[in-house]
Amino acid sequence: MQLNPTAGLAPAAPARWDRALQWSARSWMAIALLGQALFLVYVIVFYGGAAWRGQWQDWNKVLPRGFIPGDTLHNLLVGGHLLFTVLILAGGAVQLWPALRRARPAWHRWNGRLYLFSATVLALGGLAMIADGFSGPKLGQRLGIALNAMLILVCAWQAWRAARARRVDVHRRWAIRLWLVVAGVWFFRIGLMLWILIWQAPVGFEPKGFYGPTLTALAFAQTLLPLALAEAYFRAQRSGRHRAKTTVALGLAGVLTLAGIGAAFLMLWSPRL
């Protein structure tokens, strides 16, 4: 699984836009991986540190129902969800490393299997965690989370099928889609922090109850916007059309992603490290 900006390029495409598309895609990906690395450190230090100290209630400082005394099943689901978040963030970064895929193909295959398994468990765990909450003011958010989880399952299945059939290019595209939808929770966080940074206030949602139209929109955008950007990229690769527009879109996405990462780190992650 890797981002391969040179696969299937149209021969007649101007060389300058070819290079620009490669640069913008790789730059955005590097920014995203950096942000996910910061999020990974945050999850390990905050949640893992609280568990190590036996201070499980600290989880509730971030998650409204992170730890419920006496509810073993719920606590196991949340703990397992966090564990697989760590595995999948680390595993995804490794899978997207082209040099490792070429030098250690066997490792790439086994790590890919672990990644697919972790993604499946993460999606099913997420569905289980929200199964009793499809009502009330947070219904829209939960529907967005459910959509994300179901698309994780679809992309994981398609990536596995393509790999089994040795359809390498198809597998890579589905693997990239999977990486994007798996990162939905991360996209939600940086999107929310970017929104607050822009408006300098919690516009469009109730911060205490954590519900409102902004959060509902983000719950769907966390999945659909990255996928739309990926599809535009794939089409530009195959046809050579709209390459300039796609390059600009990727560049803008990189700038916004970097701003969201900075805001999330300063306002959300670093205060708890």
Image (cartoon, rainbow, N blue to C red):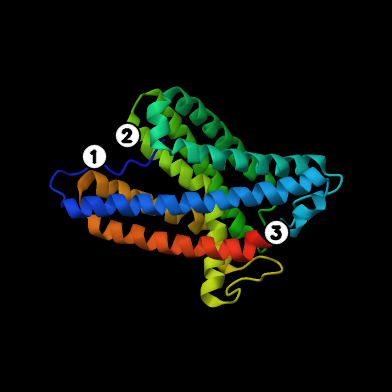
User: What's the amino acid at mark 1?
Assistant: Gly
Q: Residue furthest bottom?
A: 200
Can I make out residue 219 in this image? no
Mark 1–mark 2 Cα distance, whole angstroms, equals 9 Å
Front residue (pair 214, 194):
194
For label 1, the crowd category at 10 Å Cα-Cα, with few meaning under 14, some 14 to 19 and many 20 or more, is: some
Instruction: Quickly name the residue at label 1.
Output: 8
Front label number (3 vs 2): 3
Single out the mark in the foreground, 3 or 1.
3
Residue 272 circle label: 3
Res 67 seen here: yes
Label 2 sits on residue: 169
The 10 Å Cα crowd at callout 3, few under 14, some 14 to 19, many 20 or more, is some
Residues at discs 3 and 2 in contact (Cβ within 8 Å): no
User: Is residue 68 placed above or below 213 in the rendered structure?
Assistant: above
Residue type at numbered disc 3: Arg
- x, y percentage for residue 129? 68, 46
Q: As drawn, which residue projects farthest toward the right?
A: 70
Identify the element where label 3 is drawn: helix
Q: Quadrant of residue 8?
A: top left
**Residue at 48% in and 65% down:** 259
- Whether pointer 1 and pointer 2 mark residues with C-beta atoms closer than 8 Å, the reply is yes
Distance, label 3 to label 2, CA atoms, is 41 Å
